[in-house]
């Protein structure tokens, strides 16, 4: 006689899930969806296209957040019914299905629990990710392209829409830099723990001496700001260059010089955009990203000044946050959290959830200290 008892496991999940519902505030989320739905239903909504896009995007994000929570609640109810059915019918197939569903729900609830730690000012926003190759020649530019593919595959696994905004190809292998937007709730809070310097150690495929090569790439993550008006940028502080977009090998892909590069002279920050159809649109998109970077830089400087005035100076891990070893012992190691993955191929294929979750928990502990 089959005796499947998952009650303790299900009760533990329900307890964690109740904490998640309290943090998410489902009632407030439903009220916000109702308000946005009313705005989205206005007959004159699309008279202002920019405003309409903001309303519909916000509505879509909040509906997705609510669905994630309500789906888990329903699945927990269904799991209890499935366990009861398996016992009543003495059905091992249903029992196996229940065990599989329990394991899947434990992962889903764990992911939701991590998301409740994302309570920063901009954590709930979409993200703009920029990857730049560092020292290491062709290996570094190739590594930068590997990282770009890694994040795009991660977004694809989660069904997050991605828009590539700019790509600068290297003369040899890979890319010099790339910028893309991940349009999903909490994309910034989630991906912001990926910011920093990434290091790759491997036998170089570009040399003939079979020597180990170390190369570097930098990852920057900023939130998408609908309006970054907090920071004014005088025209005299920027240099605007217009150029023709290019693909691999330098092949022209545009018939007009519509791509825009804005350099902020006082800080040296450079933003390039070539995704939009017109020069005006690319300039506007680049200015939004530049204003956001300057605003975040301002906040970082203010926070550092407050710490200095308070006499609190903490040790830092530095920019280098993760190493990827593709020779000898195959390993990916996060230098902040100590989290390791023994299958680099799966990581480069977008299997980042474990590394990201460890990073979010580490950051929360660090902030609470």
Image: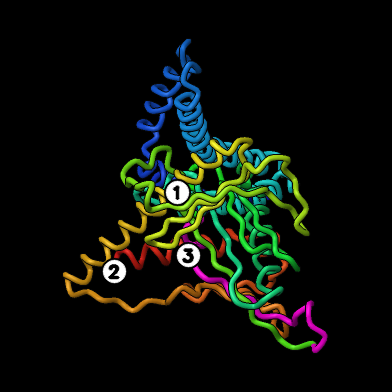
Q: Nearer the viewer, residue 1 or 248?
A: 248
Location of the C terminus by quadrant is bottom left
Instruction: Write down the region rendered in magenta.
Output: 191-209
Q: What's the CA distance linking mark 2 and mark 1?
A: 25 Å
Which residue is under mark 1? 223
Could you tell me residue 2's position as x and y percent? 68, 50
Q: Secondary structure at mark 3?
A: helix
Residue in the picture at 46% in, 73% down? 319
Q: Nearer the viewer, residue 241 or 341?
A: 241
Q: Is residue 42 above or below residue 69?
A: above
Nearer mark to the viewer, of 2 and 1: 1
Q: Residue 359, which numbered label? A: 3
Picture quarter containing residue 21? top left
As drawn, is 148 to the left or to the right of 289? Answer: right
Image location (x, y in percent) of residue 111: 52, 52
Q: Is residue 355 above or below residue 32?
A: below
Q: Residue furthest right?
A: 208
Q: Earlier in the sequence, mark 3 or mark 2?
A: 3
Q: How is the image coloured?
A: rainbow
Q: Earlier in the sequence, mark 1 or mark 3?
A: 1
Instruction: Answer yes or no: is residue 135 visible.
Output: yes
Pointer 2 residue: 369
**Residue placed furthest toward the left:** 310
Instruction: Using a 10 Å C-alpha cutoff, classify the residue at mark 3 as few (fewer than 14 neighbours), some (14 to 19) or many (20 or more).
Output: many
């Amino acid at each position: 006689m089959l005796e499947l008892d998952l009650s303790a496991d299900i009760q533990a999940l329900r307890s964690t899930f109740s904490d998640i519902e309290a943090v998410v505030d489902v009632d407030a989320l439903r009220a916000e969806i109702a308000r946005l739905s009313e705005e989205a239903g206005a007959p004159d909504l699309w008279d202002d296209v920019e405003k309409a896009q903001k309303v519909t995007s916000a509505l879509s994000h909040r509906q997705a957040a609510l669905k994630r929570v309500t789906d888990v609640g329903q699945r927990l109810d269904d799991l209890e019914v499935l366990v009861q059915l398996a016992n009543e019918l003495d059905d091992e197939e249903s029992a196996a299905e229940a065990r599989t569903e329990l394991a899947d729900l434990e992962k889903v609830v764990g992911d939701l629990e991590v998301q409740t730690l994302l309570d920063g000012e901009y954590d709930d926003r979409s993200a703009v990710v920029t990857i730049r190759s560092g020292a290491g020649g062709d290996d570094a530019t190739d590594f930068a392209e590997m990282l770009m593919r890694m994040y795009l595959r991660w977004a694809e696994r989660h069904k997050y829409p991605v828009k590539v905004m700019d790509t600068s190809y290297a003369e040899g292998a890979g890319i010099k830099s790339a910028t893309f937007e991940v349009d999903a709730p909490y994309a910034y809070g989630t991906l912001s723990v990926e910011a920093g310097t990434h290091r790759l150690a491997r036998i170089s495929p570009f040399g003939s001496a079979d020597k180990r090569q170390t190369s570097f790439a930098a990852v920057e993550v900023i939130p998408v700001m609908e309006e970054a008006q907090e920071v004014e940028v005088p025209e005299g502080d920027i240099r605007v260059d217009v150029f023709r977009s290019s693909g691999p090998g330098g092949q022209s892909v545009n018939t007009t010089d519509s791509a825009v590069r804005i350099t902020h002279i006082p800080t040296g920050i450079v933003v390039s955009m070539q995704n939009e159809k017109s020069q005006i649109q690319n300039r506007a998109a680049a200015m939004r990203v530049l204003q956001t970077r300057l605003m975040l830089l301002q906040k970082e400087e203010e926070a550092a000044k407050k710490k200095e005035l308070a006499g609190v100076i903490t040790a830092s891990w530095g920019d280098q946050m993760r190493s990827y070893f593709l020779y000898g012992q195959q390993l990916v190691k996060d230098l902040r959290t100590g989290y390791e993955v023994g299958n680099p191929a799966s990581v480069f294929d977008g299997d980042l959830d474990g590394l990201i979750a460890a990073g979010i928990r580490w950051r929360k502990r660090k902030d609470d200290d």
